[in-house]
Amino acid sequence: MKESPLINAFFSFLKFLNYSEDEIALAGFLSGDFFENSLNILSKYCESKLIGSNLSLVEFLKKEYPSLWENYIEDILSVRKYLSLYELCQYIVKKFKLEEKKNKELAYLYKFLSIVLEFSFKGGDLEEFLEYWEKYSEDELEMPKDKSAIKVLTFHLAKGLEFNHVILPLFWEEKTYSSDLGLVFYNGNIYKGRKNELPDEGKIGWYLEKAKTKMELFNLLYVGFTRAIKTLFILIPEIEETKDFSKFEVTRVFNKIYSFLRDETENFPL
């Protein structure tokens, strides 16, 4: 991983975002050729220093390349505080169109994003990740021999990314809902967070928590359904009406939507 120019430049940019006075990190980012003529920028900066310029690299960019600074670097600096670590990395990927420009290093990019996502689940911030990354930069990446190899990604990892063709299997059983309410204190009494043991008012909270969990699941489906640029293949099983049918609620709902759209298309052909 540490030998990937893309990942080294990406990591340097994260270091700069964490500490905007780190000009070595900024130079490392510019050397990654994230945008046109970035190497030429460094060359011109070095020339300016040779003739006695006192401008820092940041000041040089602001003065000589204001559009680049404002539209890219300053923009990312401004949104950084509102985004999680993983969202920030996704934003950078989109902002610089890295999937289009760096298609030969996509495997490294996806591996890096997967490490960021794994770290994000632990609740770490950018500064902690910079230290965390040092341990993982030695990881080797097994490159696929076939350029047309299939990439297998989770919903979370695929968020914000696009692919020409996507295969989305919907065959999974939903786990029985388990409330995270824990102990509930109400009117001087203590209740366990189980629906049948809660007072009527408390059950409202239980159902709201369950609805929130369901919505998170459907939000993930939305991510899956919107990754394809050209074709989307959805694999759905045939589920019988049994006592366990509720475990396949996502599949059931999708089947109903698909049946409705199919009937509408047959009645009103394009």
Image (spheres, rainbow, N blue to C red):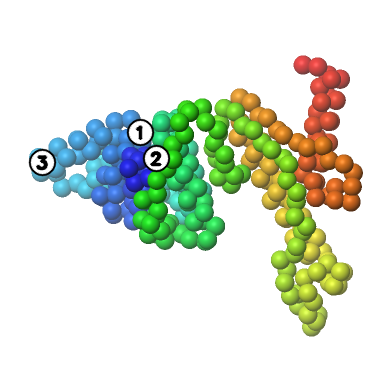
Q: Label 3, on which residue?
A: 50
- At 89% from the left and 47% from the top, the residue drawn is 242
**Badge number at residue 108:** none
Circle 3: residue type? Leu
Circle 1: residue type? Phe
Quarter of the image with the N terminus in it: top left
- At 89% from the left and 51% from the top, the residue drawn is 243
Circle 2: residue type? Tyr
Sort mark 2 into few (<14), some (14-19) or many (20+) by Cα contacts within 10 Å. some
Instruction: Report, in whole angstroms, how far the alpha carbon at label 2 lies from the one at label 3.
Output: 27 Å
Q: Label 2, on which residue?
A: 72
Quarter of the image with the C terminus in it: top right
Q: Is residue 248 visible?
A: yes
Secondary structure at badge 1 equals loop
Q: Label 1, on which residue?
A: 35
Q: Is residue 130 visible?
A: no
Contact between marks 1 and 3 (CB within 8 A): the answer is no
The mark nearer the N terminus, 2 or 3, is: 3
Q: In the image, is 252 to the left or to the right of 13?
A: right
Secondary structure at badge 2 equals helix
Q: Position of residue 78 (x, y in %)?
A: 43, 49
Count of numbered marks: 3
Disc 1 vs disc 2: which is toward the camera? 1
Instruction: Compare residues 117 and 1 and report the one nearer the observer.
Output: 1
